[in-house]
Image: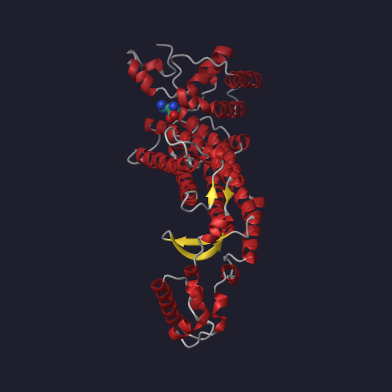
Amino acid sequence: TKQKLWGGRFTGKTDPLMHAFNQSLKYDQRMHAADIKGSIAYAKSLKLVGILTAEEEVKMIKGLEAVGKEWADGTFEPKEDDEDIHTANERRLSELIGPLGGKLHTGRSRNDQVATDMRIWLLDEANTIKDYLKALVNVLVERADKEQSALLPGYTHLQRGQPIRWSHLLLSYAFSLNTDLNRLKELIPRISVLPLGSGALAGNPFVVDREFLARELGFASVAENSLWGVADRDFIAEFMMWASLVMTHLSKMAEDLIIYSTAEFGFVSLSDAYSTGSSMMPQKKNPDSLELLRGKTGRLFGNMAGFLMTLKGLPSTYNKDLQEDKEPLFDTVDNLSACLRITEGVIATLEINEQKMRSALTMDVLATDLADYLVRKGVPFRETHHVSGRAVALAEARKCQISDLSLKDFQSLHEKFTEDVFNVFDFEASVERRQAIGGPSRKMIARQIETLRSALANA
Ligand code: ARG
């Protein structure tokens, strides 16, 4: 059986089901450009150690470029026996340049080749994803800058807590995502480690210059141990862990906005561009974009967890199980990219209803401020907390707001209350008192915006 690349020692035929089971070309063909790029660099390294003449090198590179062009033009014709992108490209190369094509794989294995291709491919995608993430952080920051006047309750346990600015909430999302940007920057060097030149497992006997290969392919470093070089897929697991974390941030934001877009809240309304209707209920406008963001979080987490299960229990170096790295990674990259762009669109086109946000601000969210008022008059906070709680209870019993209580009512709760207690009942003033770093006052919002803008400029 001449057809199969590895057919030499075989006398029996592959079961047709097994053939299909083993074949990865249908999904790994998307790494065609990475595979050609790696092979061109490898051909150059073979010339440097005398395996190829200068003439052969030129012919081989031209052949590889021609194969690459067929993929790019959509004219590449896969053959039944092309097991994966690596065998497909080598088969086609030999068709184009003859027996010389058979020299390309000298000292190389698909084991170091596939690990290299995956890293080249992911480095490229990671940069695109970084741009999407930056664009999203930017939209959040610009909205936050524009909508500083909008006040709403900040929630803990989904119960009204204290007044905040809408900008402050947007910026909290931006800070999560900016931290994700930093994490991505930190993990990229761990993707950028070159396995090529590790051979099947035991290294390269033709002593190709691996540092040359790293420079050619734009890698930051070289895998220093060949057994590790062919086996390591931690960069894939780590990228998917990172993607899962990004998705939890998108999911949180989506969940907030789903709640805020209900008629009961009405703080925001989603653009038609990111909503869908009901096939039965004519009045419906559903936040499907946000729900899909939330839903896809589970899917990306599943890709990560599933692949960790694949890695668990593998013996050292290459095992075919590792071919199972591709579909979860590709799916993660595709869906994360889509989610980031959809989120950017949702945030950019959202409308807010400042009036609705304001009317959700009931006076009880100033109960902490009422306690703080007595603190400023020298009363210990533990006591003022209790006094303020009693004011809330009194208002609740009277079915009124705490600001409707009389000075006499307040004085019955504590003697330090004077006429100026009514100044407490001002949401804007409450927010503006929060002048410590991190707070929702205008000054601190400006500081957060500045921090994020300079982070974006350097990302
Ligand atoms: N398609 C394989 C993969 O994705 C390439 C490596 C195959 N190596 C081997 N020894 N069978 O992992």
In-front residue for pair 148/307: 148
Q: Position of residue 259 (x, y in %)?
A: 46, 51
Specify whether 369 is left or right of 22.
right
In-front residue for pair 391/71: 391
In-front residue for pair 164/230: 164
Where residue 443 sits, quadrant-wise, is bottom right
- Residue at left offset 45%, top offset 71%: 400
Where residue 393 sits, quadrant-wise, is bottom left
Dividing the image into four quarters, tell me where ligand 1 lies.
top left
249 w.r.t. 273: above or below: below
Specify whether 128 is left or right of 115.
right
* Residue positioned most to the bottom: 415
Specify whether 399 is left or right of 53.
left
Q: Position of residue 363 (x, y in %)?
A: 50, 69
Where residue 322 sits, quadrant-wise, is top left
Q: Position of residue 184 (x, y in %)?
A: 54, 47
Q: How many marks?
A: 0
Q: Is residue 201 visible?
A: no
Give the quadrant of the N terminus.
top left
In-front residue for pair 451/114: 451
Q: Position of residue 113 (x, y in %)?
A: 50, 30
